[in-house]
Image: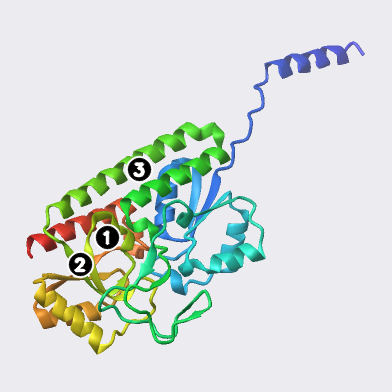
C-alpha cells in the first residue's frame, strides 16, 4: 500500500499538469448550388468558412442536366441549397419532393423582383410550347407573356441583392461567423454595384443603344436595367436553334437599317445564326457571356461573375466604339 500511494500521487500530479483537451474543429458549412452565378456568389460570401459545390458540370446547359444519385445525396445533406427556381432547373422540385433536405433552400428568383419573359418584334415563335396548361401551338404573339423570366442574375444590381440574401441565410446558420459573412457580402456587393455603375455610364453615353442577338436572349433583366433596345432570334428559355427565314430576314434588315456593327451570341452557342446575319450585312460578331455556366478552362482560370461581366463590358465598349 505504501508503494501504491506515491504512484497514485504521481499520476495525480501529472494529470494536473496535462494540457486541457482541445475541442474538435467545427465542420465547415456545406453549400450546394445549381448554376454558376449562385456558386460564385456563395463562395464570395462564405470564403474559407464553407465548402461550396456546383452541381452543373462546366460546359453543360442546365436545361439538359440530370442529377446523379450523388448529387441528390449532396442536396439532401447540405446546410444550404441554392437553386435558380425556374424552368431550367425544374428537376430541383423533383429532388425536393423525393428527399427532405436537412438544411435551408434559397431560390434566387425569390431574392429579386421578377419580370415576365415576352417576345419582341421579329423573334422566332415557339410552336408547341406549353406553359401552365396553355396551348401555344400556333406560337407566341408579339409581346405575349410566356412566364416569369428566370435569368435574374444577368443584372449586376440583382446579383448584388442575391449576394446579400445568401449572406443573411449564412448568418442564421452560423451566427458565430456573422461578421465575416456580412463583410464578405458587403465587399462583393460593392464591386457589383461599381460594375453596375460602369454599365450605366456606358449606355448613357450612347444615343439609343440597340443590341441584336442571333441567338437565345436570356438578358431581359440586363437590358431593362439599362434601358437598352434589343432584338433576338429566340426567347431566353427556347430550345430551338434554327430560326425561320423570316426571323433571319428581319434581324438582317434590322442590322442594316440601324447600321449595327456587331451581332451577339451567348456562351455554348455554335453562333451559326449570328455568323449568317453578320456575313449578310458585313457586321462582326461577339460573345455576350450570360454567366449561366462556364467552361472547364474558365473554371480552372478562376473565372468569377465579375470577371465575366467585365469582359462583356469591354466587348460592348469596343462594339459601340466601332459602330
For residue 115, what is the image quadrant?
Answer: bottom left
Q: Residues within 10 Å of mark 1 (few under 14, many from 20)?
A: some
Kindly indicate whether the residue at mark 1 contacts the one at mark 2 (C-beta within 8 angstroms): yes
Residue at horizontal 17%, vertical 55%?
203
- Give the structural element (helix, strand or loop) at label 1: helix
5 vs 190: above or below? above
Q: Which numbered marker is on residue 211?
A: 2
Residue 216 spot, x, y in % from top left: 31, 73
- Give the structural element (helix, strand or loop) at label 3: helix
Image quadrant occupied by the C terminus: bottom left
Q: Which numbered marker is on residue 223?
A: 1
Residue at horizontal 52%, vertical 43%?
169
Residue 4 spot, x, y in % from top left: 87, 16
For residue 233, what is the image quadrant?
Answer: bottom left
Residue at which label 3 appears: 189
Q: Sequence-wise, which precedes: disc 2 or disc 1?
A: 2
- The answer to which of 153 and 131 lies nearer the viewer is 131
Residue 301 spot, x, y in % from top left: 31, 56
- The answer to which of 169 and 249 lies nearer the viewer is 249
- Give the structural element (helix, strand or loop) at label 2: strand
Amino acid at each position: 500500500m505504501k508503494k501504491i500511494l506515491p504512484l497514485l500521487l504521481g499520476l495525480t500530479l501529472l494529470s494536473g499538469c496535462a494540457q486541457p483537451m482541445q475541442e474538435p474543429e467545427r465542420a465547415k458549412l456545406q453549400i450546394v448550388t445549381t448554376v454558376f452565378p449562385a456558386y460564385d456568389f456563395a463562395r464570395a460570401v462564405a470564403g474559407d468558412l464553407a465548402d461550396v459545390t456546383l452541381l452543373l458540370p462546366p460546359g453543360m446547359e442546365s436545361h439538359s442536366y440530370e442529377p446523379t444519385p450523388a448529387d441528390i445525396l449532396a442536396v439532401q445533406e447540405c446546410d444550404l441549397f441554392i437553386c435558380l427556381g425556374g424552368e431550367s432547373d425544374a428537376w430541383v422540385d423533383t429532388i425536393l419532393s423525393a428527399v427532405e433536405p436537412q438544411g435551408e433552400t434559397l431560390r434566387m428568383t425569390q431574392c429579386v423582383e421578377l419580370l415576365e419573359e415576352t417576345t419582341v418584334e421579329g423573334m422566332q415563335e415557339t410552336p408547341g410550347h406549353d406553359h401552365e396548361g396553355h396551348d401555344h401551338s400556333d406560337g407566341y404573339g408579339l409581346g405575349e407573356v410566356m412566364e416569369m423570366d428566370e435569368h435574374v442574375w444577368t443584372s449586376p444590381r440583382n446579383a448584388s441583392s442575391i449576394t446579400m440574401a445568401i449572406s443573411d441565410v449564412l448568418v442564421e446558420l452560423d451566427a458565430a461567423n456573422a461578421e465575416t459573412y456580412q463583410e464578405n457580402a458587403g465587399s462583393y456587393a460593392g464591386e457589383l454595384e461599381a460594375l453596375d455603375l460602369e454599365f450605366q455610364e456606358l449606355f448613357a453615353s450612347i444615343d439609343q443603344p440597340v443590341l441584336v442577338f442571333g441567338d437565345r436572349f436570356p438578358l431581359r433583366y440586363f437590358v431593362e436595367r439599362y434601358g437598352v433596345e434589343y432584338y433576338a432570334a429566340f426567347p431566353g428559355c427556347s430550345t430551338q436553334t434554327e430560326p425561320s427565314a423570316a426571323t433571319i430576314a428581319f434581324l438582317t434588315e434590322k442590322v442594316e437599317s440601324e447600321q449595327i456593327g456587331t451581332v451577339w451570341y451567348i456562351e455554348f452557342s455554335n453562333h451559326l445564326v449570328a455568323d449568317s446575319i453578320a456575313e449578310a450585312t458585313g457586321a462582326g460578331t461577339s460573345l455576350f457571356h450570360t454567366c449561366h455556366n462556364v467552361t472547364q478552362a474558365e473554371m480552372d482560370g478562376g473565372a468569377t461573375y465579375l470577371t465575366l461581366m467585365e469582359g462583356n463590358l469591354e466587348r460592348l465598349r469596343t462594339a459601340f466604339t466601332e459602330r
